[in-house]
Image: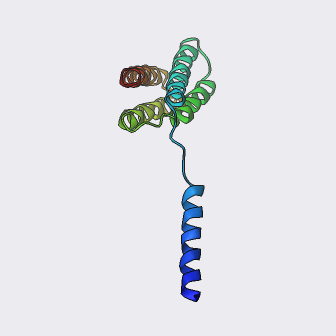
Amino acid sequence: MNTFKKILASFVIAAASSSAFAVANPTYEDVKVAIDTTLAKVEEAITALNNGTDNEAVGKIVSDARQTQKDIANNVLDVKRNRASGVLNQARNALKNNDVQAAKESLTDAANRYKEIQQIYASSH
């Protein structure tokens, strides 16, 4: 009987811990909103940079875009999302180093990558 209680307790603990960390699959709409919001943030950063906004403020927008892109949870898009995130990181680093031209190029590249992600996702759903 004692062994039975230990086994039962193990199953209960395992079930509780696995359900506590279960993440719900995002819906089509959740992923679409994340893609659209990320792209909008990248385009906002490009506009701000073109309008002469200081690098720190533009860097904040880029950081917001990097946080938002984490919600693009789709196995098909993960590689492309990770690469686009790396480009956003390059833009942020360029802004920290006051290299506005490199930041503009990276942001334009990131915008194109997120547009591609948007098109791929739209065509597959």
Residue at x 49%, y 29% (from the top left corner): 28
Residue 17, x across and y down, in percent? 58, 62
On screen, residue 16 above or below 42: below
On screen, residue 103 above or below 6: above
Q: Which of 20 and 46 lies nearest the eye of the viewer?
A: 20
Q: How many marks?
A: 0
Residue 37: quarter of image: top right
Residue at x 52%, y 17% (from the top left corner): 43
Residue projecting furthest to the top: 51
Residue 106, x across and y down, in percent? 42, 25
> In which quadrant of the rendered image does the C terminus lie?
top left
Residue 53, x across and y down, in percent? 61, 17
Does 117 sit left or right of 9 as displayed? left
On screen, residue 52 above or below 63: above
> In which quadrant of the rendered image does the N terminus lie?
bottom right
Q: Which of 93 and 109 lies nearest the eye of the viewer?
A: 109
Does 74 sit left or right of 97 as displayed? left
Residue projecting furthest to the front: 1
Q: Which of 117 and 94 lies nearest the eye of the viewer?
A: 117
Residue at x 59%, y 69% (from the top left corner): 13
Residue at x 59%, y 81% (from the top left corner): 5
